[in-house]
Image (cartoon, rainbow, N blue to C red):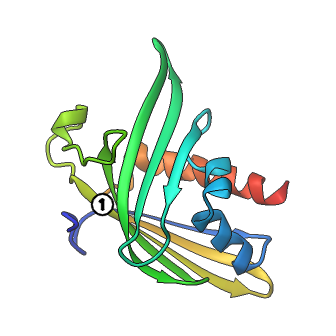
Amino acid sequence: MTDSGAGEKSVVIEREFDAPVSLVWQMWTMPEHFQGWYGPEGAVVPVATMDVRVGGARLICMEMQGPNGPMQMWFTGEYREVVEPTRLVYTESMSDPEGNVLTPADVGMPDGHPTTTQVTVELDDVDGRTRMVLTHAGVPADSPGAMGWTMALDKLARYIDR
């Protein structure tokens, strides 16, 4: 269950990619591609387990270099909607490496941050290009998470262009 309701703050980002919808869909649903672009600048994704079907689980490890060495952040979730190749909806929660959900307090997040958020990716064909609308419900538009998505989508554009 998602703690964030429709009235909560959300990150909403619209981007266009010079690639067909089918290719952008693969970037979101194939672990080997997801690992190539996900996360802010400087982040790597050593683990991406994705059972892309309604009710399927996902477990992602994002690793960044911190002042005291590498720092790992784990995320788990469940796919809620899978409409290939145009709509993907999944939940996201901070977790331990086994996929056990952690509360915001467990990871030092401020009060009021939801335990579970929801990501919606909508893809539309626009003359052979892809218009993508990403909505991350439960993450405020002015948060570090919003900035992370912006950087990740810049990386996605570069990854598609390579």
| Residue closer to the observer: 43 or 31 | 31
Residue positioned 50% across, 71% down in the render: 52
Residue at the farthest top position: 68
Number of numbered discs present? 1
- State the quadrant of the C terminus: bottom right
| Residue closer to the observer: 36 or 55 | 55
Q: Is residue 65 left or right of residue 33?
A: left
Pointer 1: what residue? 117
Residue 110 drawn above or below residue 134: above
Residue kind at label 1, given as amino acid type: Thr
- Residue 113 at x, y percent in the picture: 21, 49
Residue at the farthest right position: 162
- Residue 51 at x, y percent in the picture: 48, 66
**Residue 91 visible in this rendered orientation of the protein:** no
Q: Tell me the element at label 1.
A: strand
Q: Residues within 10 Å of mark 1 (few under 14, many from 20)?
A: many
